[in-house]
Image (cartoon, rainbow, N blue to C red):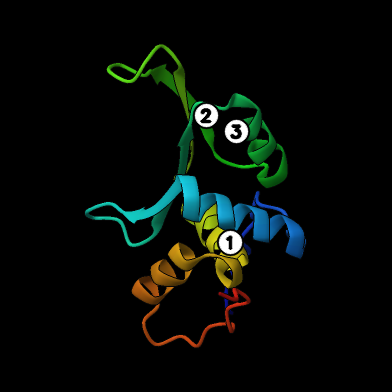
Amino acid sequence: MTWRRQVLCLVPILTDTQAAWLGALIDGEGSIYFLKGRSYPYVSVTMTDLQIIYTLLRVVQAGTLTTRNNNGFGSKRLYAWVIAAQIDSESFVRQIQPFSFKAQKALRQWFPTEPFVEPRIQI
């Protein structure tokens, strides 16, 4: 008997428009990084505009939101959105990959032998 693990992902399938917006947001205001001892990337966006963070949460439907004071750079609060779950980060990074240089770099680091979708970014 073989067991197959079904993985339920919280990140919905994104439209090209949503993936392009999120890819640009990650490239401009976010980061995709690997923590020591973890084999999958964390994805985060930190900014002072809460409305954009709420839109991000509404579109992606995954991740956590934290807030803190912005000491040393004025009185605005900083809001951070983070995906730290392996299933969600993999799905998210794969979906924005055609539109994000950071996602392409993370996937090449994460899966060095896997072929990738041709980027749709034109400069």
Residue ID at (34%, 73%) = 109
Mark 3 surroundings: few (<14), some (14-19) or many (≥20) residues within 10 A: some
Q: Which residue is mark 1?
A: 91
The crowding category of the residue bearing disc 1, from other C-alpha atoms within 10 Å (few below 14, some 14 to 19, many at least 20), is some
Tell me if 69 is positioned left or right of 87 in this view: left
Nearer mark to the viewer, of 3 and 2: 3
Residue 44 screen position, x and y as percent: 45, 44
Q: What is the C-alpha distance between the residues marked 1 and 3? A: 19 Å
Residue mark closest to the camera, 1 vs 3: 3
Q: Quadrant of the N terminus?
A: bottom right
Mark 3 = which residue?
Answer: 53
Relative to 123, residue 26 above or below: above
Is residue 13 shown left or right of residue 79?
Answer: right
Q: Which residue is mark 2?
A: 65
Query: How many C-alpha atoms fall within 10 Å of the one at disc 2: few (<14), some, or many (≥20)?
Result: some
Name the spot of residue 33 as percent of width and height, x first. Answer: 35, 54
Q: Position of residue 107 (x, y in %)?
A: 43, 71
Mark 1 element type: helix
Side of 63 where 18 appears, left or right: right
Task: State the separation of the CA atoms marked 2 and 1.
Answer: 19 Å
- Dot placed on the residue nearer the N-terminal end, 3 or 2: 3
Amino acid type, callout 2: Leu
Circle nearer the N terminus (2, 1) = 2
